Image: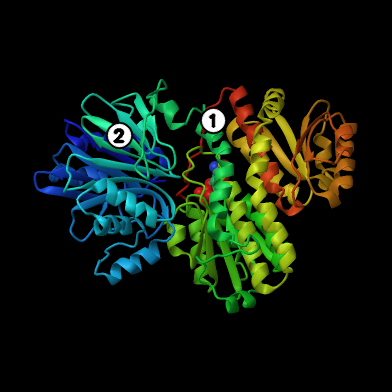
Amino acid sequence: MCGIVGYVGKRDSQNILIEGLKKLEYRGYDSAGLAVFTSDGLQITKSMGRLVNLENVLADAPLAGFIGIGHTRWATHGKPSDVNSHPHTDNSKKFSVVHNGIIENYMSLKEELAASGHVFVSETDTEVISHLIASLYEGDIVKAVQKAITRMTGAFALGVLTEYEPDKLVAVRFFSPLIIGVGEGENFIGSDIPAILDYTRNVYILNDGEMAVLTKDGVELMTLEGNFISRELFHVDWDIVTAEKAGFDHFMLKEIYEQPKAYRDTMGSRIDPSGKRIVMNELKMTDEYIHRIQQIHIVACGTAYHAGMVGKSIIEKLARIPVETDVASEYRYRSPIITPNTLVVVVSQSGETADTLAALREAKRCGARVVAITNVVGSSVAREADDVIVTWAGPEIAVASTKAYTSQLIAFYLFGLYLAQTLGTQDEAYIADVVTELKLLPDKVEQILQHAEIIKEWAEQISTHDNLFFIGRGIDYAVVLEGSLKLKEISYIHSEAYPSGELKHGTLALIEEGIPVIALATQPELFEKTVSNIKEVKARGAYVFGIHTLGETELVKAVDQVLEIPQTIPLLSPALSVVPLQLLAYYASLARGNDVDKPRNLAKSVTVE
Ligand code: M6R
């Protein structure tokens, strides 16, 4: 996700901005740029790719000056490119803006400004802000920014400079984080504390709806209406590594806790204001094409494949289209039957997984239409697919995927509902009910996270074992596969996930005294059968940890320890039930003293086949 840094003071701003952006690299980005007020006026340098590319350009043509803004961009509106990178400017090149967030009404603002002669060079929403501020400027940059904000809807954090008032840096927070760093004869802005922590530990945390005007000699805080605010400085006493993790011990734990936000962001504007229908403006496929789809192949690797297994249940149940799931590394070698009416859905957090990319290319070669579900705009998978559904999980740093997986589930719910409403396979009232429940999921995840201590105790118990089993039926089976992968990946405990009813066909021979079994039971129509399967393993000495939906009391008697999760529509339960399994893996890894975020032998992005 994008990063902002700003500086005003007595030192060379270029180095401070670059060093600040380096501290924000962990957020993920695809391009970077700086705007500095130099002896030649406001100068902007930008470069696609890693920060080192920008540094190389600046090595040949440095930007010398004492006030500047910098940005790392994670593409949303428009592909990653030099021209789409921030900072943006207006036609006079006297104003410059860096921006995190999304301006929802940028198209109408752009049309209005274009009609009065403004010429745009990028595809971004941010460029519109610089033109808007320029058009409203009447000798006071603070007033121009305030007026511009009244015209903008969405969520944003801004850093703004103008050549007309070269001693001022204006910062705005409106539902996108921004902090102000206060130094001696110098002041800073940052989208996150690590950006400024090398220079000062004294910060003002802006609240939504507040702005700041920085000069080298001071900082004025005010509301967006211009009323001055007085606030105590906050002293940061963590080190940089901790700050990047926002106080969490590991990225994985931070990312688990970020899931409610990731759910909300992924649903975002895809649920129409009536709350009853799905809007997927990003899809280029026509309704006529959707009516022609005869089968769907979902292709992915690892955790993304497990999301695809849940996706199969979702699409088959909602849209009544037959779905096959394939591990991407196998797909093209099995000569899949692909017809022009086969839709292939590839799922990839990174969008760069070589196996998934190869499967995508094979599907296209055979004439299929490809939809990508990915977390990275501008990734190879996103560029090569016909349609892209972006999951707005934000950068995922831990190798073990958590919020990317659950955001993929949300994307499947949205897509399945969209297909159903287009095909008329579900009535409007049912779709509205599912949408209502979907919107409740983030709060329910928060409720589960409040019980992390119970899972921690379970994890400590299982961490002394070398083998264990996960069982579940129906959609719960897809979820326990993910729980088992997560546990193997970071705790190095061997585990197997089985459909509960399948154990007796062989695997039951491995159940012996004391072996832990994690049983997931969230599907009412399968509940009694699952309880019977639990009794089978209990009778052979297993120690059973049961996770079930609130209200199903029979399981409590059948297992040794139990965790209840909130009720939802059974089809939506994976978006809740996987959360305790993620925590179980996390705490088991911790109990075993492993490197949670960087497990042995594994990489975050697997770009080899
Ligand atoms: O970036 P992708 O979603 O394509 O990655 C696919 C797998 O490599 C990934 O999900 C992997 O299984 C995770 N490390 C599991 O936590």
- Residue visible at 59% across and 43% down? 260
Lateral position of residue 293 relative to residue 156, left or right? right
State how the image is colored: rainbow
Residue furthest to the top in view is: 237
Q: Observer-nearest residue: 56 or 10?
A: 10
Lateral position of residue 580 relative to residue 134, left or right? right
Q: Hey, which quadrant is residue 187 in on the image?
A: top left
Residue 81 seen? no
Q: Observer-nearest residue: 514 or 433?
A: 433
Any mark on residue 270, and which? none
Kind of residue at disc 2:
Glu
* Dot 2 alpha-carbon crowd within 10 angstroms: few under 14, some 14 to 19, many 20 or more: few
Kind of residue at disc 1:
Val
How far apart are labels 2 and 1 at the CA level? 42 Å
Q: Observer-nearest residue: 235 or 145?
A: 145
Q: Which residue is mark 1?
A: 596
Dot 1: element: loop
Of the image marks 2 and 1, the number of the one nearer the N terminus: 2
Residue 401: percent from left, percent from top: 56, 42
- Residue visible at 26% across and 36% down? 214
Any mark on residue 220, and which? 2
Lateral position of residue 490 relative to residue 127, left or right? right
Residue 144 seen? yes
Distance from mark 1 CB to nearest ligand 1 atom below 8 Å = no
